[in-house]
Image (cartoon, grey):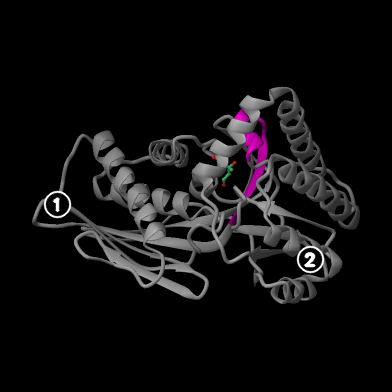
Amino acid sequence: MRVLASAPAKIILFGEHSVVYGKPAIAAAIDMRTYVRAEFNKNGRIRIEARDIKTPGLTVSFSEDQIYFETDYGKAAEVLSYVREAINLVMEEADRQKGVTVSITSQIPVGAGLGSSAAVAVATIGAVSKLLGLELSGEEIARLGHRVELLVQGASSGIDPTISAIGGFLHYKRGSFEHLPFMELPIVVGYTGSSGSTKELVAMVRETYEEMPDIIEPILLSMGKVVDKAREILISELDEDIRFRLLGKLMNINHGLLDALGVSTKKLSELVYAAKTAGALGAKITGAGGGGCMYALAPGKQNEVATAIKIAGGVPMITRISREGLRIEEVVK
Ligand code: MEV
């Protein structure tokens, strides 16, 4: 038997970092996917093969027995640990240990803050659980994905695996989520070309929080209020141009607060200002920061903003929101 599953990347629209402290966040799945094929093998071992683990312009290929890396070994090894933990958790859940070969291909740049680790974990859980005959709901897959992140990263809010498993547009708080009305947002994502470590950035914010809670707590509180306001606007009947203008303002405020937490970089700020100068209504970091990606809201100006991001040295990506989360693509008996 062979199963092919896929799971999408995500962008956090509002509320990264503060979501780790129990505040709400809003995220959307986007139309870049990681594909995982799982099949039984005869030697009884677990084998992981990964090809085309992409960062724009680079390719990393590795298998468990033989690791070869054309670019950055660290990133490839990180992917491997999410896959390994995902397989272990599913086998524990099914109470079955079998030889399984898992092959991965991905369209999602690794370490760019677009949820590549969560997508690979969710797609692996989807493929391996189906192979073992487990019928898991989207919520159960999201919960297992969150456990994988906690094992590999130490700390995680669970928002990345939830959005990757469920898809669409979600308001998320402490493991619970609500679907927001589906809409196409005219956004442009800008990749700085370098990656930040979510684990290290979350730990860095935690350290600052512990050193000066009186200062950091109000920042996190404000971030939570930005998310409440964004949710109110997204579900409102306001005209689209007013809605976008207000959302843009909230993005700029959220970016400033993230900068205050210390997770922006010179390059991220340059891309944010380049996008705004080219006519974006708002721009902010998306994901953990420290490199990775920003995104801009640019109704009617997506091409101009993409060009400005490119001139400022970033890699622009015009993406669409994906309604679908985890997808079982094929089951061959
Ligand atoms: C990473 O995509 C988002 C963070 O808020 C971490 C998390 O929620 O687990 C930085």
Q: Residue furthest left?
A: 43
Q: Over which residues does the magenta segment extend? A: 17-29
Report the front residue among 167 and 332: 167
| Residue 231 rendering spot, x and y as whole percentages | 76, 40
User: Looking at the image, how many numbered discs can be counted on the residues?
Assistant: 2
**Looking at the image, is 120 positioned above or below residue 92?**
below
CB of mark 1 near ligand 1 (< 8 Å) = no
Q: Residue at x 25, y 35 (%)?
A: 92
- Report whether 95 appears left or right of 217: left
Secondary structure of the residue carrying numbered label 2: helix
> Which of the marked residues, 1 or 2, is nearer the chain's N terminus?
1
Q: Residue at x 35, y 56 (%)?
A: 77
| Residue 27 rendering spot, x and y as whole percentages | 64, 47
| Residue 290 rendering spot, x and y as whole percentages | 61, 52
**Label drawn at residue 275:** 2
**Looking at the image, is 48 positioned above or below residue 23?**
below
Secondary structure of the residue carrying numbered label 1: loop
Question: Residue 221 lies in what quarter of the image?
Answer: top right
Q: What residue would you read off at disc 1?
A: 45
Label 1 CA crowd tier, 10 Å (few <14, some 14–19, many 20+): few
Q: Amino acid at mark 1?
A: Arg
On the rendered image, what quadrant is the C terminus found in?
A: bottom left
Quadrant where ligand 1 appears: top right
Q: Amino acid at mark 2?
A: Ala
Question: Residue 145 lies in what quarter of the image?
Answer: top left
Question: Residue 277 lies in what quarter of the image?
Answer: bottom right
On the rendered image, what quadrant is the N terminus found in?
A: bottom left
Q: Is residue 315 on the magenta stretch?
A: no
Q: Does residue 293 appear in this view? A: yes
- Report whether 138 appears left or right of 241: left
**Looking at the image, is 275 positioned above or below residue 257?**
below
Q: Residue at x 14, y 57 (%)?
A: 41
